[in-house]
Image: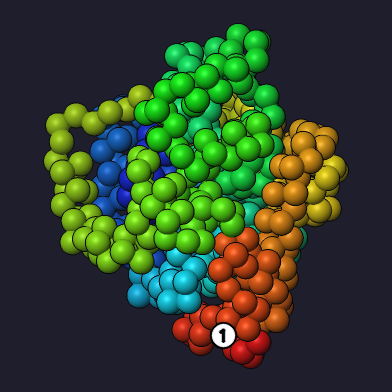
Amino acid sequence: MKKITFIGAGSFGFTRNLVKDILTFPALADCEICLMDIDSTRLEYIKLAVEKIIKQGGYPAKVTATLDRAKALEGADGVVITILAGGIDVWRHDIEIPMKYGVDINVGDTRGPAGIFRAMRTTPVMLDICKDVEKYAPNAVVLNYTNPMAMLCRAMQSETKVNVTGLCHSVQGTAWMLSQWIGAPMNEITYLCAGVNHQAHYLNYKWNGKDAYPLIHKAITERAEIYNEEQVRNELYLAFGYYITESSGHNSEYNPWFRKRKDLIEKYCTHGTGWNPGLHRFILDEYLSREDTWLNEIKEYLAADEIELDRGQEYAAYIFNAVFGDNTMFEFNGNVRNFGIIDNLPHGCCVEVPVIASKNELRPIKVGSLPPALAVMNNITAGCEELAVEGSLTGNPQKIYEAICFDPLTSAVLSLEEIKQMTNEMLAKNKDYLPQFKKFTV
């Protein structure tokens, strides 16, 4: 019996869907699903949901739940991490303080000043988890879904011996979106995608072995509804010739071209699907409303006579099956350190590249060099992240300030002195969550 442990299992929708996928693999159908969270109420409900999946599917699996992380990790073959360090009352300031200075962030969980501070709060927790993995499950495959993906993976991969990679939905999600735009069945699409998390590009995208970029270009330039669906990403494609992975909402805040003025936000950042007018409002509206509705949604799921058990496309289940299930090889895009994988990005930075999962192994595939313009874009991101990781690990506020200074959106809006003031204000708000820091001013 294999053991798969969820750290942060109270993420109800994600955990239940991934468990559903895992149990569809015959080699994993009798595994132990071990659920761990610090919220006993959420833990109780996700255990009931997993029991429902096991019962309806007739699986020989078993489920356990615990508040004890060491107990959860003991003997685990696979570990999934999906946590949030600090609640809404803390991380809302990641958005609201920059907004006060004129830096209008949209999501803020991945990079820029908001993503950097989330990384600073989360890094000590992730390293503590990895220490427990080293002690209680040293051979486990660890899959991280927690943002900011690249900075957290970079810290874990450099400071621990854990076999960890990070997974994001954007690569397969965007590949599917593009296939819909050109009318292609997804099973006839192949691609090579590489770069850094949320800023990887499809270096090739083929339909039945033939270059599909002309069809993508035609869809974007001739169909207004498709152009408007992803205005920021489509503008990036038209400028640089390759399609980027993460949503327009995210990419508007990763670059200097779309959110530095109100007229640009109105033009590019309000009309596509999935837009938030700014997370400072999104927090107050949607996130706070979820605090009142999440339990009703869970109870509806548990009360349903039948639940859907078909396998989805989430990478984690396929990876676990490849490494310690039936060993069917599986290729995915994962976040790993750049040791000779992408030639024109910094040595040792975190990159998102194709990885082969097979028996007892995760092996990244060498990509070579990115096209020059894409390399410039990714080098700026990777450079900021390297500074931020160093600052997070050492508790050095100067490194954090330097990382934010070079953030493209921040530097498009603020002076160096204004960035220093903003950084100091954010440090002061976060001081209770930064045990690695002794000084909270630049």
Question: Mark 1: which amino acid?
Answer: Gln
Q: Residue furthest front?
A: 263
Front residue of 107 and 386 = 107
- Residue 438 in picture, x, y percent from top left: 64, 90
Give left or right: position of 218 versus 43.
right
Q: Specify whether residue 70 is in view.
A: no
Res 90 quadrant in image: bottom left
Q: Residue shown at 30%/35% (left/top)?
A: 53
On screen, residue 217 above or below 132: above
- Residue 364 in picture, x, y percent from top left: 74, 37
On screen, residue 214 above or below 8: above
Give left or right: position of 340 versus 172.
right
Front residue of 231 and 367 = 231
Q: Residue shown at 65%/31% (left/top)?
A: 241
Give left or right: position of 58 versus 388.
left
Task: Report helix, strand or loop for mark 1.
Answer: helix
Q: Residue shown at 48%/33% (left/top)?
A: 173
